[in-house]
Image: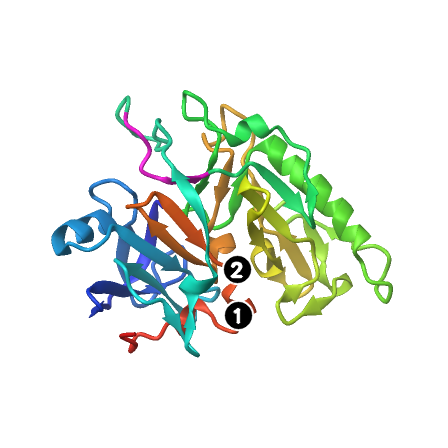
Amino acid sequence: MDQILVGSSLSRTSSSFVAKLFSGHNFANGVKGMAGLGRGKIGLSSQFASAFGFRKTFALCLPSSTRSNGAVFFGAVPYIFLPGIDASKSLFYTPLLLNPVTTYAAYVAGEPSNEYFINVTSIKMNGITIDLNTSLLVFDKDGYGGTKISTVHPYTVLENTIYNAVIRAYLKILQAQIPKEFPAHVPRVAAVEPFGACFNSTHIRKTRVGPVVPNVDFVLQSESVYWRVLATNSMVQVSKDVLCLGFVDAGLRPSNPRTAIVIGGHQLEENFLPFDLAASRLGFSSLLSSGQTTCANFNFTSNA
């Protein structure tokens, strides 16, 4: 994680700290500054663990609206969301990887990365594996490649060849899953920056959890462990009748960022993400709204 916007309230709960978090990428009303959550010694989690003697871990829950609060947790704390839902009961886990070369623009030679990398091994869409250059998914000796999580990037950024493979597959599968009662084709419309694939949303069926579009799975250490990106997180409503796929083309090396896949803020929203630095693992939930709660529903009064 690079940096996140954080609100001003910080309270003690069960020997841990819980801070109200505001979504957004510019300083909004009620936001006092930015909090560094990197895995280095100056990261907030490391400093709190050292100062107060609790486990080196934090959890992040970004809201999907600037009108709602999310939460960031430091230390081990019951993750109880209204109406009495324990988010820790529905987590999957994947190892956090250490890139031996920093991906920051300014760095000291030989310095490892303080960012959070995970082992994405393939990408699937509605269960179909996308044909892409999987060597890009592993960082090389120079630190290029791999997958990291970043709240600095508002949307997921893909290396150019991965981006093109995802777009081709998405267009094919989207057209194939159109219900019979809808027109036989979902028209593409002019791209709206920074996105490359935008559609006429009146041709896409909608449900309680979002538009009916292909699911995107980031497959992790095994076929049975994957981070599913549902429509709410994969699509962006840019205007009344226009939906865009919320992935951005990073371009080709060497002009693009070092990392092949950067999972950005929009794709993290309403997902509960505990970063256990002591055990070097990341927990992740399915979309909280699927369980009838949201990041805004953390029960700040609970000591359970």
Residue under the image location 73 percent in, 52 percent down? 189
- Residue 296 higher or lower than 255, as above or below: below
State the SS at label 2: loop
Find residue 194 and report its horizontal and vertical position in percent. Answer: 56, 46
Question: Residue pushed farthest left?
Answer: 51
Question: Foreground residue, 265 or 278?
Answer: 278
Question: Foreground residue, 182 or 61?
Answer: 61
User: Horizontally, is 55 left or right of 86 in the view?
Assistant: left
Question: Foreground residue, 8 or 271?
Answer: 271
Q: Amino acid at mark 2?
A: Ser
* Quarter of the image that includes the C terminus: bottom left
Q: Quadrant of residue 118?
A: top left
The colour mode here is rainbow
Q: Which mark is residue 286?
A: 2
Q: Which mark is residue 291?
A: 1
Q: Is residue 151 visible?
A: no
Q: Which mark is residue 19?
A: none
Find residue 82 and report its horizontal and vertical position in percent. Answer: 42, 77
Q: Quadrant of residue 131?
A: top right
